[in-house]
DNA sequence: TTTAGTGTCATAATACACTATGACACTATT
DNA sequence: AATAGTGTCATAGTGTATTATGACACTAAA
């Protein structure tokens, strides 16, 4: 994991974990790397990882078994879809739309974006 | 101007100034608010505004006349289009596309986005 | 019971964004 | 010449993210 200059590390760790779950690389019920292990892996302090995990636990994404470790909660996927969709529509999309207007980007410029959107139109299971 | 939690203030000021220029609210050649004036307006320290202005000057967006103030440079608009478009395609768009895939958002969900894109298809002056 | 692995808490140190403030050089105006 | 408005620089203080490290309670397995 490589960190961005301008966003807090503990939030980037949280986002990375969220992505792992939403893409299915981590399944509900799975044990996730221990605080110390992940910290060593990504060369970050234990306390920083702990802060990310605590945040995810507060959000209902992770569960904690004392002395054992953190696990992906059973409802994590649907909870995350709600949280992330809400954030996307409220926080992410509006400035993006504004940027597209201001930079005057058209269908040709955003071909890759349109392709992805239309491929989602053809998926059967909208929710799981 | 209201500031986001998780991004440096001096960068948000820079982004706001960029937006003012790209939307035409500030024109090339215009004098922009003095360091002290803007700082007072948005209730931020002089040094923070100074840092934003210095960054914009370094990027070729602003020019400085000693003892007088900062002005929007003549080439600011095309310079900004280059900078912001490059950043959009390299830094902004890829994670957005990834989010749309992961959250399985389709044309219906992103109607407002598609509307803007297609309205840009019908504009005559692609560059100015 | 011992050992190793978990999370958790506390403390101190470092880095940096931001603030607060004063001082100075330059420019335009009076 | 005096004044007010510009940017600029320096200094010190504050808040907070991050690091570094040690200690402790809990759990599982040897």
Image (cartoon, coloured by chain):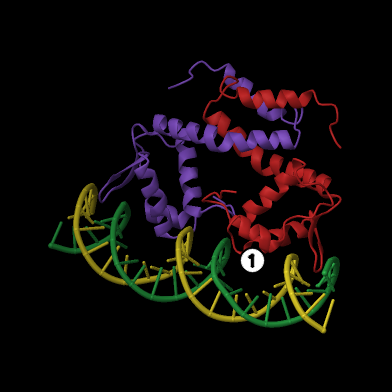
Chain colours: A purple, B red, C green, D yellow
Measured as percent of width and height from the top left, residue A124 is found at 51, 15
Which residue is drawn at the image coordinates 37% and 51% (left, top)?
A34
The residue carrying mark 1 is: B47
Would residue B92 be found to the left or right of residue D21 on screen? right
- Mark count: 1
Which residue is drawn at the image coordinates 71% and 39% (left, top)?
B89
**Subunit bearing disc 1:** B
* Res. A33 in view: no
Q: Quadrant of residue A29?
A: top left
Measured as percent of width and height from the top left, residue A104 is found at 76, 33
Would residue A20 be found to the left or right of residue B55 on screen? left
Q: Nearer the viewer, residue B23 or A25?
A: B23
Q: Nearer the viewer, residue A110 or B45?
A: B45
Above or below, B117 against C27 in this view is above
Which residue is drawn at the image coordinates 40% and 34% (left, top)?
A27
Work out which quarter of the rendered image holds the C terminus of chain B and state it: top right
């Amino acid at each position: 994991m490589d960190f961005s200059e301008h966003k807090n590390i503990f939030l980037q760790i949280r986002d990375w974990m969220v992505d792992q779950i939403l893409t299915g690389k981590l399944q509900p019920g799975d044990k996730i790397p221990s605080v110390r292990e992940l910290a060593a892996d990504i060369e970050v302090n234990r306390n920083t990882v702990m802060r990310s995990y605590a945040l995810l636990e507060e959000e209902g994404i992770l569960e904690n078994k004392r002395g054992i470790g953190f696990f992906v909660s059973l409802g994590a996927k649907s909870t995350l879809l709600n949280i992330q969709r809400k954030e996307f529509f409220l926080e992410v999309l509006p400035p993006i739309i504004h940027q597209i207007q201001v930079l005057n980007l058209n269908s040709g410029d955003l071909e890759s974006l349109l392709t992805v959107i239309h491929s989602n139109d053809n998926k059967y299971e909208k929710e799981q």
